[in-house]
Image (spheres, rainbow, N blue to C red):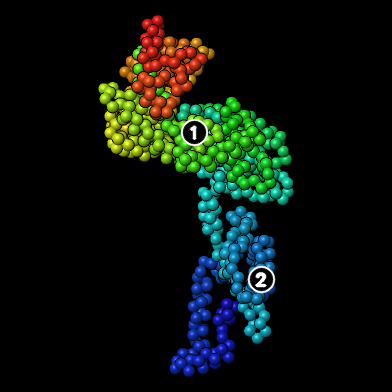
Amino acid sequence: MAIEDLGTSTGDEENAVASSAGNSGSNNDFSTIATERSAELLGLIEATDQIVLVTSATGVIEYANPAADDVLRRHVQPASVAQLFSEESLEVLRGAAGEAVRTGGKWSGELAILVSDDEQECIERPVAVDMIGHHNRDADTLTHISLLIRDITEHKRAETSLRNQATRDALTGLPNRAMLMEHLAAALARGQRTGLMPAVMFLDLDGFKAVNDGLGHEAGDELLIEVGRRLGECVRNTDVVARFGGDEFVILLDNISDLEMAQQIADRIITRVEEPVALSSGTGNVGTSIGISLPSVTDIEAETLLGEADTAMYQAKQLGKRRHQYFDDDLRKRAAARDLLKEQLEGAIANQEFWVMYTPVAGVAEGELRSFEAGLRWDHPTRGLLGPSEFMVLAREVGVARDLDRLVIEDAVRYAHDWNVGLDYPRTVWLTVGVQDLLSGELQSVIASAIESVGVAPGSLGIEIPLVTLTKHPAEAFKALQALNYNGVRIAIDDFGTDQFSPAQLQRFYADTVKLDRRMMTSLAKEPEAVGALAAAASVCRSLGLEVVAKGVNKPEELELLQELGCTNVQGDVVSRAMRAENVVEVLGDTAPWNGEGSWPTREVLPNAMTRSQMAERMLRLRMAA
């Protein structure tokens, strides 16, 4: 049947239309219009770049437009659509598509046709197909089928590219978190049916920062790509290796039989990752810490299993790195306690369970209280007093960290004013500031607003910046510290003396005080060379006109040594533990011992309580003896 025949009308149709036209007053002849439109339709069909086919009811091709000829000439001309479409597509044509055309007259969908590439190899090409069935009206039987076929190869490529962008890591090409979570959810569902559950391994590279900083970010990227490749070598084809960003990877071990099998794979990974990597700018040496989690119950959520592996990985790091750790019952109890703590955080703020406590800093020479370090404590109903290291990370996860930061700032600013009324040389109240707080930009405005509202004198308030913040974010830190210094806020560099840092840079960051890393004090008894390191750090800082505070001073003999080395200020149990603001007021009035428990520094060191004046006398004697 030729394409022209599709537009031909029967005599009955012409008479019916003519009668209708006559009733409406029209003199047009329908047969002429139909013939003209058929010619126009034929020209359109033959000009389009889409494939148009007309077949018999059994699929024998009776007409193909030039676009179809262009595709079909690349291989043996098919006599029927059975030779044109892939096997999978033929199943659709013989089934749902064929039934729709026979009964409803139309079907649309995506199939695949077979074409030849440049090497005459037969390949599949995705196409969108619209099918129309033409029926004999008298017998109501299917006589012909028209097919409109559009090549959607580029569309599919773009679709795949977009999906890869959404589900693949751009650097390594590995699945990202989104894709991994899809695989993990599917693996858990299969495990419920088969009884073979998946395992999850969470990996973090040990030593990656040294490579990234020392050899450059390009070398770091090369290393991550190579690690991803090595991880793929260590697992089975059915497993999934994903990159979570940074130097973190996650591996899904599907159908794992037991913990021992997972541990064997982890051992293999640790060994393989530790092998040196040849990079364009040098050699990279890293290790990895691995957390392993297996489902404890059959209905465990994917996020829960992943979180357990993450927790186990951090435990592996704490135990010495370059090892694997299983998420056992002990870790499960700790994680449950952590989750409970998160739930209790918001209620704790409403119940006013948080206190701001102040740790005194004393001058070594005269025993005068020089400053106070403000710190937050949680008076937990069942666990007692908790330090910030136990809840601030959780507070950021829950979203209440800013509320707690504001609480500390407002309290510290108030007492920075109250404790300095009438003093020529203010006692500074120090706030400890983390990298996120310093770089967010919000901290400066909050502090400036609090200072303005209370009327704090310059030098009464200070902030302590961890040294690592300055080394990692020098430009951003400089800008933030400049703004704070402009508002009369003192700057102290915390944790100084153990990491490499140019002393000349201290003054660039507006610092007037340096707090020596407490690890320097703990190493004095074990490492004789630590005395020289401490003396050198204190000497450099003094030469720059900076005040030096030794933190973590807990023993009287350490106090005497610090005097001998020329350290001007001390902080720790030898002075006092942290106390509430009302206790500070009593101490400043010389009506109470330094230590809230009734003695200074502790009952074990000195049996009798000491007031501030008594402490000054003791320090003077020690200094003279030194």
Q: Residue at x 44, y 16 (%)?
A: 609
Amino acid type, label 2: Gly
Q: Residue at x 58, y 91 (%)?
A: 12
Residue 276 image offset from top left, x and y in percent: 57, 28
- Indicate whether 410 appears above or below 503: below
Horizontal placement of 137 versus 207: left or right?
right
Q: Residue at x 54, y 38 (%)?
A: 341
Amino acid type, label 1: Asp
Tag of residue 379: 1
Q: Secondary structure at mark 2?
A: helix
Residue bearing mark 2: 98
Instruction: Report crowding for label 2: few under 14, some 14 to 19, many 20 or more residues within 10 A (C-alpha).
Output: many
Tag of residue 210: none
Residue 154 image offset from top left, x and y in percent: 52, 57
Quarter of the rendering occupied by the C terminus = top left
Q: Secondary structure at mark 1?
A: strand
